[in-house]
Amino acid sequence: MSIRLAILVSGRGSNMESILRAIKEGQLDAKVEIVLSNNPEALALPTARKYGVHAIAVDNQGLSRAEHEARVLKELSEYEIDFVVLAGYMRILTSNFLQKFKHKDGYFRVINIHPSLLPAFPGANAYEDAFKYGSLVSGITVHLADEKVDHGPILAQESFPRLEGDTLETFRQRGLAVEHKLYPKVLQSIAKHGIRLLPQEEMIRQ
């Protein structure tokens, strides 16, 4: 079953582009209805338009969180959306926002990707934190969002190694390569099978 997505971004949107590319190449049965950024200068916006996707900015500058979310929700309400996909969206979503996408089974139809093996290294600097900590294995987590930051039911995790001689940048690039494959893969699983949570015993430990 094809799923209808809204993608929220703040920056260059490399994960967004990996999703759009997977759709274009027939690897992901989905349609991106809208790409929305809180940053009018986000490079993701012209990239999305190159794929023929409606892309807009709703600037958060000068607005309270509630005011900004109300404007974002107004834009999203124009579309039939199965899932909101966070792809480097550097805004914390409130419970009010999440409640607008609550599924009858109790979870929120909002999906996030995070560059660590959650629950390890939550926050905006996960690559840096894992690297500074000296983790020999790190990874990527795709999860359903909830009211806590970088928290919620886990859909998938994939690890990658820290190699001898790695710099923070080579470490980050190895992780990004995993991100760009894992996110479309998880979305395709949802399109094919619906939401399937990762069993606790299959979670990867750092």
Image (cartoon, helix red, strand yellow):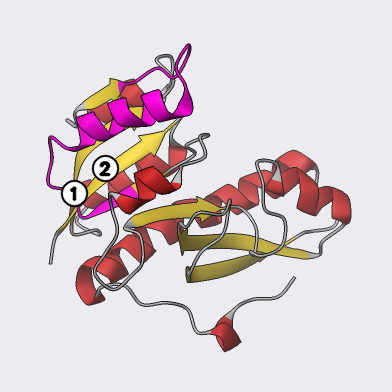
The image position of residue 112, as x and y in percent, is: 46, 53
- Determine which residue is flagged by label 1: 81
Amino acid type shown at disc 2: Ala
Could you tell me if residue 11 is visible in this image? no
Quadrant hosting residue 77: top left
Whether pointer 2 and pointer 1 mark residues with C-beta atoms closer than 8 Å, the reply is: yes
Q: Is residue 166 magenta?
A: no
The image position of residue 136, as x and y in percent, is: 81, 65
Q: Which residues are magenta?
A: 57-84
Placement of 189 over or under 39, stated as above or below: below
- Determine which residue is flagged by label 2: 6
Placement of 173 over or under 200, stated as above or below: above
Which residue does the image show at 47% across and 62% down from the upper left?
Answer: 143
Describe residue 67's horizontal placement relative to residue 163 as left or right: left
Could you tell me if residue 180 is visible in this image? yes
Describe residue 158's horizontal placement relative to residue 27 as left or right: right
Q: Secondary structure at mark 2?
A: strand
Most foreground residue, 50 or 7: 7
Picture disc at residue 190: none
